Image (tube, rainbow, N blue to C red):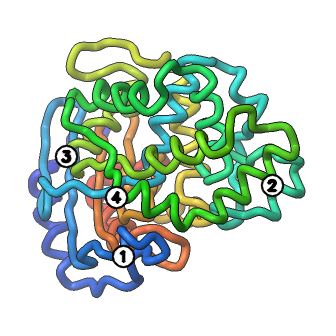
Amino acid sequence: MLDKPDYKQIIKEIEVELKSIVSEGKVANYIPELAKVDPNKFAFHISSIDGENYGFGDLDEKFSIQSIAKVFSLTLAYKLNGEDIWKRVGVEPSGNPFNSLIQIEQENGIPRNPLINSGALVISDILYDTLSNPKVDLLNFIREITDNHDIEYNIKVANSEKKTGFRNSALINLMRSFGNINSDINDILDFYFHLCSVEMTVKELSKAFLLYTNHGKLLTNDKEIITSTMAKRINAIMHSCGFYDEAGEFSFKVGLPGKSGVGGGIAAIYPGKYSVAVWSPKLNSKGNSYLGMKALQLLTAKTKRSIF
């Protein structure tokens, strides 16, 4: 059995080594509000199952977590609707860009998985049908799993996405034509854009993902939010689908279940051991944080711990 990693020392080493890596890529400028973010921001935070917390960088600065929030909406929809959700969305990697229209057309309106845009729109539709006040109820759910009532939507980011979200509009209309969207399209898009605008710090994000590290239970009070089987399946989807059409690369180089967002954030977990969040706004060509990917590669190399 491997000795427990010295997280504090490893984080210091990662901080030093990242300084020698030139950050490539660019911010997600197709969303006007995200284009305003300082591209040189960086934060890294790890939370262990034993209650240890270490990090460096802009730890207390909130950022738009974007598609990472799709994990939370999936979790809530799965909790409330059980296995029925898989009748409307698959669990396979897309192998295509996260906003592909061609794939939806070819597969009769059924998204490949719930972490690409089309799949998250279907999950949003499911939640809209299920919840009495979807935006409030979802936010309260995220606040519960972070144990933080300061989590909010960034309305400027949500409105910015609404003004430029033409491709998401095309996706949801195409799925509606196949009968896989039930509620009003404009309502679902509004809910989806708010979902993606959720703001958190890396400390808050890392703490939230302890739910998936801890097999569906809150670490603070041992409350079961989802069953261990549900947590296992969500982790499996994150592993195979959490990084768009770069999921294989992330698995190959990092070896953890996780989810990225075009705001530059990445959250990942080692089941039963730790959760980690990183934020660096410059994205590679696949839409994933360039330095974030490097940082997590260093983490699993130095801890000698991945799921493999």
Q: Would you call the spot at circle 3 few (<14 residues within 10 Å), some (14-19), or many (20 or more)?
A: many
SS category of the residue bearing label 2: helix
Instruction: Identify the residue under disc 1.
Output: 35
Measure the alpha-carbon separation of dots 4 and 1: 12 Å
Residue at 56% across, 17% down: 80
Residue 268, percent from left and from top: 39, 48
Residue at 63% across, 24% down: 129
SS category of the residue bearing label 3: helix
- Earlier-in-chain disc, 4 versus 2: 2
Instruction: Locate residue 136 relative to residue 4 in the image: left or right.
Output: right
Foreground mark, 2 or 1? 1
What kind of residue is marked 4? Lys
Residue sitting nearer the eye, 170 or 89: 170
Instruction: Identify the residue under disc 3.
Output: 203
Instruction: Identify the residue under disc 4.
Output: 156
Up the image or down, 283 lies above or below 271; here it is below
Instruction: Identify the residue under disc 2.
Output: 104
What kind of residue is marked 1? Ala
Q: Would you call the spot at circle 2 few (<14 residues within 10 Å), some (14-19), or many (20 or more)?
A: many
What kind of residue is marked 3? Lys
